[in-house]
Amino acid sequence: MKKNRSRADSLNELANHEQNWDIIVIGGGITGAGILLEAARRGLNALLVEQKDFAWGTSSRSSKLVHGGLRYIKEGKFLLTRDSVRERQQLMRAAAGLVEPQSFAFADYQGRKPGRWMFAIGLVIYDFLAGLRGKHYFSAQDFHMLAPHIAAADLKGGSCYQDAKTDDARLVLRVLQEARAAGATALNYLAVKSVTYENELASGVVLQDALSKQEYQVNAKVIISATGAWADALRQQQGASARLRPLRGSHLLLPAWRLPVAQAVSLMHPRDGRPVFVYPWEGVSLVGTTDVDHGADMQQETAITAYEVAYLMEAMDFQFPQLQLKLDDIIASYAGIRPVIDTGKADPSKEGRDHAIWLDKGLLTVTGGKLTTFRLIAQDAFKHINHLFPDHQADHEADSLFTRPSDLSNVKQLSHTQKSRLQGHYGESAAEIVQIAQDGELDYIPGTLTMWVELRWAALFEEVEHLEDLMLRRTRLGLLLRNGGLALLPRIRAICQPELKWDDERWEYEQAAYLRLWNRYYSLPDRENIPDWRNQRQPI
């Protein structure tokens, strides 16, 4: 059975200076993971370090859409849209079961913008850039069949188009899995205390293990900061000016039976015209997103605010008035911080989503961009350092993103959907996951699309250092189950505690810490502070 080198072995290697590193990547989100994979496939000796857990930041708190950015067409950003839709198509092919097609429905109401024909032109261009063609507009009767429960008054019809969705944290882990298989090293809970310099150029980092507090000095030919919304902190240590505008995007999760959508429903918010959506995700309905300036401590978890809850619920009440949704219907919430380049626009939603690359005294910073285009961002980063590695150029034969997953065709106890899920989420390890499953562990966890065996696999092989890692990122049970999965924690404990080798005291400590975290950052704010969205419209 394949297994990564243990964290202890990798740290021992750092302590003994056993490796001559070509590249050190700082940041364990999708951008850092993509750069690590690109480095490993070029045959470079690459190390990735993450101060918290893999995908802890934006890459586990995104809207989880792999999309081309339909709104960028309106802004005239055709090249960005073209690159995004092509990457979307490739990801759906290379990681089927992890990146899946998602149809979007947009209702056309009398007197509402953008109007049928304007929207139709955008969709034709959108599909053309992806090499697709299809019917977009449907009559009111047909559209109501596609999107039941929407408001019927003044409905003229509606448009449908295709995008894709994913589990963002698992996408990061899948990319890291590919990078490690190609020879790279990735370590979580290993923070960069400082960047070291030689001849006024970045030449290494001082690392500190967040668990043991031990420090390590590690050198490399290239230091790359892929820390997303946190990138300014490292740059400002070198005297560079801040360039980022951290924006918060918040989301709600509701039971699928309470907010039933067969496909995504997108709308313009009645208050400010911003796009809002709801779509089926991992067995629940996901509602998002807001787009507001985030002024809180960047080193702390972020959470939805009372006014953001009201904002999203107002949108759902506007689009689905007959459902009469209530706060009690909400399972969980989450909020993430987007790394957006600050151009000084008054409206946060008007800021661009392009990525940026800056070089400050030898420290290469890569930030911004979209989940969809992580591979292109990594390739762009290497254009700035290719000259340092003339013997390690890219080999993009067939431009394959992921290796072929293990074959599950002879596994009779799994449905086609389950096989596709395991292959997409775990690649070459899919068959091994089936092999370690004990009685009943190939069943779905109630209310989710997660199988019990995924917990066992994560506990054994996926660097779970805290219970929150398991519940919020290795699986998404903390988002999919009420009270963070409290009712199922006894069975989760029975599966995972022996594999994690935690004694009872450690488990009790981790469980208490996780539940405190969930209640503070993933539930709802104090209800008395949440405005009544049906009777008044408060600013966010």
Image (cartoon, rainbow, N blue to C red):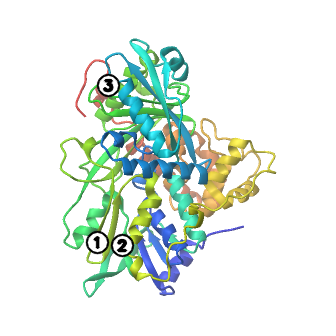
For label 2, the residue is 384
For label 3, the residue is 113
Point out the tag, 1 or 2, that comes first from the N-terminus.
Answer: 1
Q: Do the residues under discs 3 and 2 have CB atoms within 8 angstroms?
A: no
Q: Do the residues under discs 1 and 2 have CB atoms within 8 angstroms?
A: yes
For label 1, the residue is 359
Point out the tag, 3 or 1, that comes first from the N-terminus.
Answer: 3
Q: Report crowding for label 2: few under 14, some 14 to 19, many 20 or more residues within 10 A (C-alpha).
A: few
Q: Quadrant of the C terminus?
A: top left
Q: Amino acid at mark 1?
A: Leu
Q: Is residue 175 above or below residue 353?
A: below
Q: Is residue 34 above or below residue 216?
A: above
At 57% from the left and 44% from the top, the residue drawn is 100
Q: Quadrant of the N terminus?
A: bottom right
Left or right: 426, with 103 as reference point: right
Q: Which mark is residue 57?
A: none
Q: Residue 459, position in %: x, y? A: 61, 59
Q: Nearer the viewer, mark 1 or mark 2?
A: 2
